[in-house]
Amino acid sequence: MSRTWVTPGGVHPPENKHQSVTLPIGQLPIPEKLVIPLSQHIGAPATPCVEIGQQVLKGQIIAQAVGMVSIPMHAPSSGTISAIEHRPIAHASGMLAPCIEITTDGADTWIEHQGISDYEHISPKKLLEIVGNAGISGMGGAGFPSAVKLNPGRQRPIDTLIVNATECEPYITADDSAIRERAGEIVEGIKILSAILDHPTNIMIGIEDNKPEAIAALAPHVEDSGISVVVFPTKYPSGGEKQLIYILTGKELPAGKLPADEGMVCINIGTTYAIKRAVTDGEPLISRVTTVTGDAVGTPRNYDTLIGTPVRHLLEHNQFDEQAGGRVVMGGPMMGFTLPSADVPIVKTTNCILAPSYAEIPDDEPAQPCIRCGMCAQACPVSLLPQQLFWYAQAEEHERLEAHNLFDCIECGACSYVCPSNIPLVQYYRAAKGDIRQAREEKVKSDHARDRFEFHKERIEQAEREKEAKRAARREATQQAKADHLAATANGSEVSSAAPTAPATPAGAVPSSSAADIIAAAQARAAAKQASPEDQRAKLERTIASAEQRLKMAEEKLTEAINDDSGKQDKLSAAVENTRQKLEQSKSKLAELAE
Amino acid sequence: MAFKQVSSPHAHAAQNTSQVMKLVLLATIPGLAALTWQFGWGSFINVVLASVTAVVCEAAIVKMRGRSISFYLGDYSAVVTAVLLGLALPPLAPWWVVVVGTVFSIVVAKQLYGGLGYNPFNPAMVGYVVLLISFPIQMTTWVAPLALLPVGAAHPGLIESLQIVFAGYSPADGVTGATPLDVFKHSSGLLVDQVYDREPLFNQAMFAGAGWEWVNLGFLLGGIILLSQRIFTWHGPVGMLGALALMSIIFWDSGSSSSPGSPLMHLFSGASMMGAFFILTDPVSSAVSNRGRLIFGALIGVLVYVIRAWGNYPDAVAFAVLLANFAAPFIDNYTLPRTYGHTDRRRATEKEED
């Protein structure tokens, strides 16, 4: 018997698990319509690859994975695609999300599929591909794509594989009954996992001591397999990933780290079954065990439920009494969320549909003031101070909340469960987390906007500086040209403007550095100009065109002035002459260039 | 089908604040019984009178604040405050002492700060201290314990007690007397052994003063009941009693004439046990974390001893608790528990590093 560690806090709510395990896992008739949400997992939603009206077979891919963290979706039964549109899904907000609806034909015809029996001889890469293509995501909690979780492209090798069979939430028995009936296949799934992870030295199935039948069912299959079944006392929430890791290894997962960073993989036991089916039978994940329980249903039990089955179908086949209770919960009574309606479909993470009566789960009483009794702090499994968090959440003191490690809260609900004042603590924390996340995002946005503004300002200033420098250079060049012109006139010969060496500089005198800079700049400009004769020609052509235009206009004005006999004739005739000279200069330059 | 939308968790433990308060009330019964047995009907009358006053005051204020009277009276917190104050007051104190103290506790110390859950100071102790400072004579006149009554005399009966409390009748001679802490306060020049030999309050007792030891045992029993019901954790009481015991051992001075008394005397005299289990465990005004409550309790233990030994008052629980109430938010800042996955405790005042 392996050693186990004890987590702080925790609560012991009434388990209410016995009701749903009196009967074996049942099968429901195939529902008329199946609604498959495209996002049943963490990561990018899948993209439909079928069209409305298309016939699909059971197990056929109907939506492809998009990107690295995503999974494909498969038809849970044969039939016709009847809609691809937004539908209500199982989400606390009651939001709509893209779904594919299949109108089943009742024949339940499988697509051709084949499994692999000797997975030991298949490369982990190939096995991972099978797991990924089978659309398997974690079936215990958040629904993280399994192939991504098991991908060996990580820093360190995996030495510990933890299979989570804790099922610590009251009422739920999906894993329990699956183990009772499918222990052999589950253990085979674990062996496949072990092969994928290159045989970790430590393989443990963590299970609470309230499931003796399941523990007994596992025992013969794990003999001499190197897999140990670790039993520990029942306490909520032992099944949280972080809690289970501590219970089994005595190690805490450092804040912000993933189990893989510590050489561990933690996977739900239902997922191992799906992996086994995918590898050895070639079946994608199209059904799962779901507990239907609570006093508002006739016979609490587990069903092997097709993904996409509307909750209504499950409830109606189980004599659901709508009058008996006010809420229907997907998940357990501690962390499950209420469904907006019975139209939402079962997804890959749906382990339980709980329809409690008013007697079981009465409506909430009005909250009394917090007396800081500290029962919440005694119950908290991660050693937070819920009463302080509540106080600061009310006051919206974000810094205090973060200093009190609000983001380490796993929202298990143990604090609200024990609160004698009936304060919905977890709701306050969720809201506060949302506020802080939003504030962070806004801060990022405003930082970004500020950076952009500052960059913009800087750019404008730089442009201004460059302009100023250009102006200065131009001024300098004009002076230079004038000097050249003077020198040329004095020598009576043509001086190439491309040789701007100042003749005025006395021999042996060193030009000042700023003058040298300007000269260098002018030379660089001249060199740049000469580097591209095409540009030069184009520019000259443009200059000629505009000069011709101006000459024409000047001549018109001159004619006008002569006709009017205004006193502007001299000035205008000088301007015309000037323009004509420039034009000729440019023309001769162009001719020069053409040579 | 449209279902009710409620956020998780859906399950709740059966316990509620009213039940917690009722349990606290029940747990005071052994202490009250010991007081009544050893000191007559006075404490019982105090408790009833204070409770009635508290309920009337609470109802009046809640009505003035426009809140539901039945909802707020239903939490029993006013009654708990009143009962604790009533137990702390000297038996057979005049009725107006009890009423003034209770009014101050409920109206000023509790409701003016925002009612249950918002009072920074322990309301019962605020009332007690106001009375102690305002009416020192009435507040230091204690009834003599059963063992010390003159031969053939008895504590006044219920009717007679009511007459003393409400009509100002004087109790019979010898019915009032000093407390063990008073005796020690004024026993300069005597060795502890001599005090124990000469003073009837001690030579008629088992270990810590006639009558008082029984009262303290009663409150200890009540406290253990509450501990076993997990109404509070051991940290506060153990912190206080531990610190008190430690201080009295350190300054025991082998029972010399300057010794402030033995550890047993300090633990089982005055309001030690009541303070440890019923006063400092008021969660509203104490520190919040386990570690914080341990420090909070220890601070009270040290303060109690310091005031008893070197201060002007024979007992000090009320002052010590109020002083520690001041310190509670400060203690809270530095006593956060270490959260899962973190290597260190954090400070509540930590700013986010940018």
Image (cartoon, helix red, strand yellow):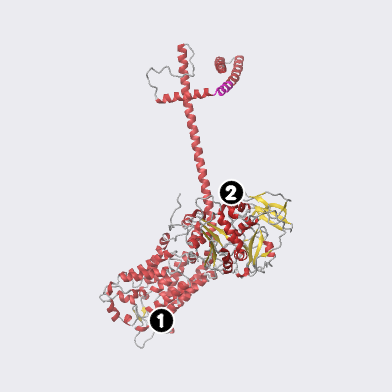
Q: Nearer the viewer, residue B169 or B35?
A: B35
Callout 2 secondary element: loop
Furthest residue in direction top, as rendered? A492
Instruction: Give the Cα distance between marks 2 and 1.
Output: 86 Å
- Above or below for B282 versus A461: below
Q: Are marks 2 and 1 on the same chain?
A: no
Magenta span includes A566? no
Magenta span includes A541? yes
Which mark identifies residue A174? none
Left or right relative to B284: residue A132: right
Q: Indicate the amino acid at tag 1.
A: Ile
Q: Chain of mark 2?
A: A
Is residue B242 shown to the viewer in this render?
yes
State the image coordinates of residue B49 (x, y, percent, origin top left): 46, 76
Badge 1 is on which residue?
B164
Q: Nearer the viewer, residue B270 or B166?
A: B270
Left or right relative to A401: residue A559: right
Name the quadrant of the C terminus of chain A: top right
Q: For marks 2 and 1, give the one nearer the viewer.
A: 2
Q: Which residues are magenta?
A: A532-542
Q: Indicate the amino acid at tag 2.
A: Met
Label 2 neighbour load within 10 Å: few <14, some 14-19, many 20+? few
Left or right relative to A249: residue A124: right
Badge 2 is on which residue?
A68
State the image coordinates of residue B230 (x, y, percent, origin top left): 47, 71
Please identify the dominant SS of the magenta region.
helix
Q: Chain of mark 1?
A: B
- Above or below for B100 versus A305: below
